[in-house]
Image (cartoon, coloured by chain):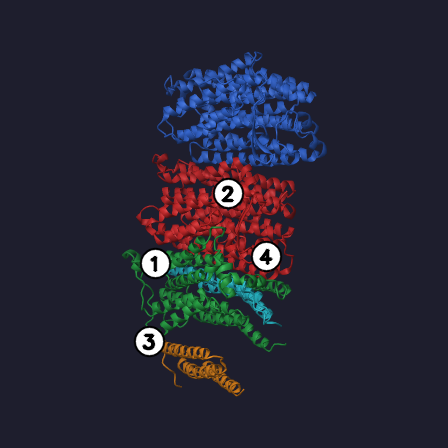
Chain colours: A blue, B cyan, C orange, D red, E green
């Protein structure tokens, strides 16, 4: 391949999208038995995507602007852009996709419908990448719906009655959310005449002239993306979607669906309304309150769950709202915390879900009450799990601590001291539901663990991914201030989002 | 009272009667008859519209239209009747 | 003038026969009697009217056509009468003589 | 010989139909060739329209009020292209549906009826004379009824007879309307109607014709014949009936309401109300349907309702815009519904039944057909980036910007309902715990899956090129809406 | 009341409406069909009165004659199939669910309202509307024929007429598709008198049909009327069993069905070119072409109508199918 001049490749975002979008039909068409070829394509494309994203990130940090447009209807464009915020999310998706692909290949080694699984898996990542790079709300909507459609078959992959029920609930929630988003997008289009994401927002005039309409629009848009972000009245789909295979849950919780929602909230608040306008409309405080309620509610519900994946799911409900909270506090420091948490929560949660999957695969352990002594049976997996859990609780210097620290600072900055109390309370609750799991795993002798062989046979493809991500959890926390760390990039992003405000 | 008025009203009445039959009649043949009445009503209207007070000759275009309409309706009738016959054969056989 | 009034008389007479036939059709008790009334009276009525109209005709061609019409109608109505009577008899309904 | 592509678009399928009828043994070859040739003629016509904006031919050299003219503009060529392209793909799909010696007779009659249907539809899209349109819808009706009863089952015959009655009545109402138009205006060409002054006779005419067309296109509450007819026909016939045939009447409706100067707010709104009823009632019925094809047929009722809502959202001042939305939706539904019916037919052929509850109880999974069905459903539900989505977007945009929130609400509810009833089907596709035997997923591959798949992909892909499609539809300013 | 014929018009109009009502309300289906035939003939008479002899002829021959025959044949079939041939009255042959009286009344009121509205609209309309009179008069010399209706049918609006023949073709294809087989409800044996009549009438009908076709160029008559009259030849042949359709005859029958449409469309297409469009006959050949088209269309119409009457495609059915067929 001849080297392309680096600045001269405007189609790069499209290529990143196509690496997963075009792979999907190929994967669908491959016969079930062509496992090696499929694995090769999957891993190759995932690696390629990581490379391309790295390239893109470098270019963007050098100040290159990528802006791809394609007219869908008069005045209405399909638009891909690569701003720093997009890069943040795209990198997360690309890296975690690679890791999850490895894990899925191992997890589904002999399972049925692999062609279908990996096809939709690819589509799902394509949708996530599209959401990340969407340059306007219209494009965002397209990928948002694609994400719903691509994840539905993954959620009900097992094809059991329970899975179908979960799938139905999932579909009803997310498609309704999608419809509301459609309405909101239309409303934006009718009110503002554009749906572009522009730092500082596009609704200043509308907000000044028709504050009621703007408020309504805010409610509609945030409510719509809030469904995927599992904000509290709209969270019910997430725990039931746990019937999905482990890698799907990992992806759903760490990268794709809930993050798409959280990311959407960011886009809406920062780049549709603009943080100042949103504040002026008086919409940030209710959003913060909603996030706070979600944080507490999710944690409380998590305590009583016996099913490991369900407990983790409620934990997600809670943790993702940190991001919303950080956005809603309307302080640059809190925003750094929010964006950082977008990454950190992804790493932590994916580790835990993969570990949970390994427990189920290797030991048949699916409930907290069966976890006695699993630490000895699967030390690597459980070490990873422990690391992630501690990070989630907010033990310094792990990833979760960093985000919570910034959030707390942001709370003070925004004059909302209650945030500190909230964070403390939430950390306490986190400890209440995670520590017993660790305790059982390491300090109790389980009957269950004795029955099974000492070294359960799980392949390296299952064992390695959670350990990798756990190490990353360690790294992003420990080296939070190193150049090119997620947090540094986050500061870059926040600087852009708030630059408009200072002007 | 001129012929066109009388026959125009006649046509409208016939159409309405046919319409009522087409909506309400249950028997398959009867419904078809009702539809035929409708077509005659429409024909009346066109012929009436073409009429000019003698000795002026009537407008030939509507006449051509009505002739076309008659042929079209007979075609549709034939198909409907074939369906009725076939259906009756099938239904009677199944009832046995 | 003479021809015209003659044809008028013939047509009027034919109409009378038609009316008589129709009355018979409505009043007579069974199929056979009704057929009788129809075929006989109407046949005669038709002949008279045809004759009357023919007297008014402009050309020999028209007269010829009227004759043809009369002929075919007569044959057709006779055949129809026959068919009806035949059907009636086959389906077992004899004439009623009371 | 003439080189007028309009004439060829009419005559090629007609000659094809006659040839196929005369030579039943060569039906497949002749039939396919005719449809393909018609596609070619339409392409040429599209070229002409692109160059000139509109094309007219006064047949027989007699200009419009006395004679009949053929006219093509962006809208009609769009409809023609849809008809021919969908028709060609359905024809290809029919090769598989009607293969084997057992279906010799079906094959033998499918082709002439379908080609006559094509003749009739092309005639409607090129027609400018309301009486001629009446004759054309009768051609369509007879051919369509023939196709409906092609399977020869009792249910199909019953449905076909009901369809026949509805068709005849609709056509006769239309004919009476034509009579009233003649009574008042004294001419029958569409262009002549624009100048007509409003009067009682003209209102009566418009009302009669509109009701007749509503019956033909199955707008609630005159939809009673449609579900049974479309559900009981053979798959290719259903695809043609649902995808294309109902559109002919819709198209006439579109043209008429533009040319008749009498459309007031009340009439437009009441049409929208009927559309809304269709959306809701059809949705509920589709939820309750037990058979896949019946569900798809009810979804046609819903979509027709949606098109009428699209039509109603703007009221007279904005009517020049709303027809575009309606046209987009017509196009989207035509392509997607044909794909969906063919996919449903394939599923039925593979499983041996199409009971929704038991879609998973079969040793095979016609994966590709199911996939096709899902793709088509995406467009019909109106999810991005399909053409159905673009249509729904435009519909909602129009309704929102004119402040017609009730249409927004109805459309939303309709969309949710469609999600609900289609997800019943998806659940059947993806359920695996009730079959003991290992399922052979790819057993359902067949060449016959390709035409519906192509159509379904087109329904999705056309959404991406909606902008050029829209500007093509506007060619020749179909309703005098020149800027 | 200047015209004494108004009384006649009133009486005729009233009896037509009364007959229409009777057609729908009489219980016996046979009577309904007979009443319908009478209704059709009286309507034809009314149209003669409205100086529309062509329409009247077409209505009498096709709308009433052929349709009546079709209806009676179907009725006979239904009675045969249901085994009710020996019952005096033909009732309830097809499945009937009784309609409640209130529904009937509502329906009648609804249709009455529609009729009222239409009547108002009709009376509002101009007494003598604008029309095509002047245009037709102007174009007549260039049409190639002398009778305006024929000029309209075969020249000015030939496209309509072609499509009308296509409708007939579609109908016969659909009918053949629906029904097939040789066996049939046996036609009643009609006896020698009938046979003699048929022998006498057949040639006469052929002559009349041809005459109607020929005269169409300058006087009332034409392809459709002639075709319908000729079709009655077919009906007579079929009824008297002089001719029984055979599977082997299907090819020629198909050819006959297609003939009219084929020649009509071929001529329409072939005359075009060199600046002319489809259907634009060169004036010097216009009459010849129109007569050619009319002649062949007449044959097609006659055969098609007769085939519609016969109904089924004459196919030799397999044993299984025959048992399933009546």
Q: Could you say whether the residue bearing mark 1 is in a helix, strand or loop?
A: loop
Label drawn at residue E180: 1
User: Where does residue A102 sit, x and y in percent of width and height?
Assistant: 43, 21
Using the image, determine if residue A13 lies above or below residue D422. above
Circles 4 and 2, Cβ within 8 Å, touching? The answer is: no
* In the displayed structure image, the side of residue D38 where residue E120 appears, left or right: right
Single out the mark in the foreground, 4 or 3. Answer: 3
Q: Could you say whether the residue bearing mark 2 is in a helix, strand or loop?
A: helix
Are the residues under badges 4 and 2 in a single subunit?
yes
Using the image, determine if residue D482 lies above or below residue A150. below
Callout 1: residue from which chain?
Answer: E
Are the residues under badges 1 and 2 in a single subunit?
no
Q: Going by the picture, which residue comes out furthest to the right? A: A209
Q: How many marks?
A: 4
Label drawn at residue D46: 2
Which residue is depicted at the point 59% across and 15% down?
A488
Mark 4 neighbour density, 10 Å: few (under 14) some (14–19) many (20 or more): some
Label drawn at residue D207: 4
Callout 2: residue from which chain?
Answer: D
Circles 1 and 2, Cβ within 8 Å, touching? The answer is: no
Which residue is depicted at the point 46% across and 45% down?
D41
Does residue D388 show up?
yes
User: Where does residue A226 sit, x and y in percent of width and height?
Assistant: 58, 30
Label drawn at residue E196: 3
Does residue B12 show up?
no
Task: Give me the C-alpha separation between circle 2 and circle 3.
Answer: 62 Å
Mark 1 neighbour density, 10 Å: few (under 14) some (14–19) many (20 or more): some
Q: Could you say whether the residue bearing mark 3 is in a helix, strand or loop?
A: helix
Residue toward you, A44 or A145: A44
Task: Give me the C-alpha separation between circle 3 and circle 1.
Answer: 31 Å
Task: Give me the C-alpha separation between circle 4 and circle 2.
Answer: 33 Å
Callout 3: residue from which chain?
Answer: E
């Amino acid at each position: 391949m001849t080297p392309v001049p680096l600045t001269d490749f405007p189609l790069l975002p499209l290529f990143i999208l196509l690496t997963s979008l075009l792979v999907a039909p190929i994967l669908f068409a491959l016969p079930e038995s062509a496992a090696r070829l499929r694995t090769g394509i999957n891993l190759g494309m995932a690696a390629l995507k990581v490379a391309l994203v790295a390239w893109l990130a470098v270019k963007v940090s050098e100040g290159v602007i990528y802006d791809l447009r394609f007219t869908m209807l008069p005045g209405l464009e399909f638009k891909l852009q690569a701003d720093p915020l997009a890069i943040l999310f795209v990198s997360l998706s690309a890296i975690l996709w690679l890791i999850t692909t490895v894990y899925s290949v191992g997890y589904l080694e002999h399972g049925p419908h692999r062609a279908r699984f990996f096809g939709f898996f690819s589509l799902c990542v394509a949708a996530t990448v599209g959401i990340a790079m969407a340059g306007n709300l219209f494009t965002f909507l397209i990928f948002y719906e694609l994400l719903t459609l691509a994840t539905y078959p993954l959620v009900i992959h097992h094809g059991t009655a329970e899975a179908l029920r979960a799938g139905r609930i999932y579909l009803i929630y997310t498609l309704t959310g999608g419809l509301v988003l459609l309405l909101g997008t239309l409303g934006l289009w009718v009110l503002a005449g554009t749906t572009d994401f522009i730092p500082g927002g596009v609704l200043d005039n509308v907000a000044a002239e028709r504050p009621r309409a703007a408020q309504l629009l805010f409610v509609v848009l945030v409510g719509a993306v809030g469904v995927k972000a599992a904000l509290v009245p709209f969270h019910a789909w997430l725990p039931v979607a746990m019937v999905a295979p482990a890698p799907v849950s990992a992806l759903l919780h760490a990268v794709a669906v809930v993050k798409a929602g959280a990311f959407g909230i960011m886009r809406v608040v920062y780049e549709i309304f603009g943080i100042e306008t949103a504040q002026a409309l008086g919409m940030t405080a209710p959003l913060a309150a909603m996030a706070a309620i979600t944080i507490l509610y999710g944690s409380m519900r998590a305590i009583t769950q016996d099913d490991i994946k369900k407990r983790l799911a409620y934990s997600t409900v809670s943790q993702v709202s940190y991001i919303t909270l950080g956005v809603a506090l309307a302080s640059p420091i809190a925003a750094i915390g929010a964006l950082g948490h977008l990454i950190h929560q992804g790493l932590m949660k994916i580790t835990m879900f993969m570990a949970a999957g390994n427990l189920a695969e290797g030991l048949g352990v699916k409930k907290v009450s069966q976890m006695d002594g699993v630490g000895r049976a699967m030390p690597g997996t459980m070490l990873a799990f422990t690391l992630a859990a501690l990070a989630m609780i907010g033990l310094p210097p792990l990833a979760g601590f960093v985000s919570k620290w910034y959030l707390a600072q942001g709370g003070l900055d925004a004059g909302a001291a209650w945030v500190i109390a909230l964070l403390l309370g939430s950390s306490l609750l986190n400890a209440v539901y995670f520590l017993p799991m660790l305790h059982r795993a390491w300090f109790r002798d389980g009957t269950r663990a004795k029955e099974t062989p000492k070294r359960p046979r799980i392949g390296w493809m299952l064992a390695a991914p959670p350990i990798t991500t756990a190490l990353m959890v360690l790294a992003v926390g420990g080296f939070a201030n190193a150049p090119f760390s997620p947090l540094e990039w986050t500061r870059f992003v926040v600087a852009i989002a708030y630059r408009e405000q200072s002007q | 009272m001129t012929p066109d008025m009388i026959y125009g009203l006649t046509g409208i009445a016939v159409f309405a009667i046919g319409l009522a039959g087409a909506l309400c009649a249950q028997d398959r043949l009867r419904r078809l008859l009702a539809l035929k009445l409708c077509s005659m009503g429409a024909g009346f209207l066109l012929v009436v519209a073409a009429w000019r007070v003698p000795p002026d000759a009537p407008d030939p275009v509507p006449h051509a239209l009505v002739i076309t309409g008659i042929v079209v309706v007979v075609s549709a009738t034939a198909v409907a009747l074939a369906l009725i016959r076939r259906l009756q054969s099938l239904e009677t056989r199944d009832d046995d | 003038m003479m021809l015209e009034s003659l044809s008028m008389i013939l047509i009027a007479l034919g109409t009378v026969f038609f009316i008589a036939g129709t009355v018979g059709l409505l009043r007579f008790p069974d199929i056979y009697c009704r057929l009788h009334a129809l075929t006989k009276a109407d046949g005669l009525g038709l002949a008279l009217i045809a004759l009357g109209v023919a007297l008014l005709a402009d050309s020999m061609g028209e007269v010829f056509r009227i004759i043809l019409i009369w002929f075919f109608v007569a044959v057709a109505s006779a055949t129809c009468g026959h068919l009806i009577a035949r059907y009636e008899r086959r389906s077992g309904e004899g004439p009623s003589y009371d | 010989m003439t080189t007028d592509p309009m004439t060829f678009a009419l005559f090629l399928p007609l000659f094809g139909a006659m040839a196929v009828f005369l030579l039943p043994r060569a039906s497949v070859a002749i039939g396919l060739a005719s449809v393909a040739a018609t596609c070619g003629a339409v392409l040429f016509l599209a070229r002409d329209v692109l160059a000139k904006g509109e094309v007219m031919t006064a047949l027989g050299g007699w200009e419009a009020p006395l004679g009949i003219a053929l006219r093509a503009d962006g809208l009609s060529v769009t409809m023609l292209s849809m008809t021919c392209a969908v028709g060609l793909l359905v024809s290809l799909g029919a090769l598989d549906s009607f293969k084997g010696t057992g279906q010799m007779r079906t094959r033998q009659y499918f082709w002439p009826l379908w080609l006559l249907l094509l003749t009739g539809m092309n005639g409607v899209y090129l027609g400018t004379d309301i009486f001629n349109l009446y004759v054309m819808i009768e051609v369509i009706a007879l051919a369509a009824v023939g196709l409906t009863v092609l399977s020869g089952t009792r249910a199909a015959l019953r449905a076909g007879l009901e369809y026949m009655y509805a068709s005849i009545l609709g056509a006769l109402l239309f004919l009476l309307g034509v009579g009233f138009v003649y009574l008042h205006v004294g001419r029958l060409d569409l262009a002549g109607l624009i100048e007509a002054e409003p009067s009682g006779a003209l209102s009566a005419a418009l009302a009669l014709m509109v009701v007749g067309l509503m019956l033909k296109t199955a707008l609630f509450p005159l939809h009673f014949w449609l579900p049974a007819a479309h559900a009981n026909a053979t798959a290719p016939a259903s695809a043609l009936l649902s995808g294309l045939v109902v559109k002919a009447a819709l198209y006439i409706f579109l043209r008429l309401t533009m040319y008749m100067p009498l459309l007031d707010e009340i009439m437009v709104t009441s049409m929208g109300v009927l559309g809304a009823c269709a959306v809701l009632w059809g949705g509920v019925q589709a939820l309750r349907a037990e058979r896949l094809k019946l569900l798809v047929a009810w979804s046609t009722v819903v979509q027709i309702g949606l098109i009428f809502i699209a039509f109603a959202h703007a009221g007279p001042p904005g009517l020049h815009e709303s027809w575009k939305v309606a046209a987009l939706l017509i196009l989207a539904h035509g392509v997607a519904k044909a794909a969906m019916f063919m996919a449903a037919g394939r599923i039925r052929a593979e499983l041996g039944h199409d009971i929704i509850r038991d879609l998973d109880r079969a040793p095979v999974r016609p994966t590709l057909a199911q996939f096709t069905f899902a793709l088509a459903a995406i467009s019909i539900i109106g999810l991005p980036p399909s053409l159905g989505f673009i249509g729904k977007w435009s519909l909602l945009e129009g309704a929102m910007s004119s402040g017609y929130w009730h249409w927004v609400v109805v459309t939303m509810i309709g969309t949710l309902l469609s999600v609900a009833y289609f997800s019943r089907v998806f659940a059947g596709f993806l359920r695996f715990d009730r079959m003991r035997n290992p399922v052979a997923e790819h057993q359902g591959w067949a060449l016959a899956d390709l035409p519906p798949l192509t159509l379904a992909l087109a329904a999705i892909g056309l959404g991406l090129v909606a902008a050029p499609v829209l500007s093509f539809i506007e060619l020749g300013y179909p309703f005098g809406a020149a800027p | 009341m200047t015209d004494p014929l108004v009384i006649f018009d009133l009486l005729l109009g009233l009896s037509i409406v009364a007959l229409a009502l009777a057609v729908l309300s009489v219980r016996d289906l046979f009577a309904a069909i007979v009443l319908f035939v009478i209704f059709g003939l009286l309507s034809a008479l009314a149209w003669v009165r409205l100086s529309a002899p062509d329409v009247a002829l077409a209505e009498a021959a096709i709308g009433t004659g052929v349709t009546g025959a079709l209806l009676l044949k179907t009725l006979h079939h239904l009675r045969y199939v249901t085994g009710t041939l020996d019952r005096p009255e033909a009732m309830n042959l097809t499945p009937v669910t009784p309609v409640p009286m209130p529904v009937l009344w509502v329906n009648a009121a609804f249709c009455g309202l529609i009729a009222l509205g239409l009547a108002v609209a009709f009376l509002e309309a101009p007494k003598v509307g604008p029309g095509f009179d002047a245009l037709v008069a102007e174009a007549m010399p260039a049409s190639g024929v002398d009778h305006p209706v024929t000029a309209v049918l075969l020249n000015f609006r030939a496209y309509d007429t072609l499509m009308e023949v296509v409708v007939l073709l579609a109908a016969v294809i659909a009918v053949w598709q629906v029904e097939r087989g040789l066996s049939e409800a046996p036609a009643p044996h009609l006896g020698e008198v009938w046979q003699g009549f048929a022998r006498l009438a057949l040639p006469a009908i052929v002559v009349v049909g041809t005459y109607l076709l020929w005269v169409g160029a300058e006087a009332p008559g034409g392809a459709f009327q002639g075709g319908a009259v000729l079709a009655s030849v077919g009906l007579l042949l079929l009824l008297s069993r002089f001719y029984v359709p055979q599977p082997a005859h299907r090819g020629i029958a198909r050819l006959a069905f297609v003939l009219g449409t084929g020649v009509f469309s071929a001529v329409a297409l072939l005359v075009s070119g060199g600046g002319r469009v489809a259907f634009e006959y060169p004036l010097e050949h216009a009459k010849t072409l129109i007569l050619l088209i009319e002649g062949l269309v007449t044959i097609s119409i006659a055969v098609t109508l007769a085939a519609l009457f016969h109904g089924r495609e004459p196919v030799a059915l397999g044993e299984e199918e025959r048992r399933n067929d009546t």
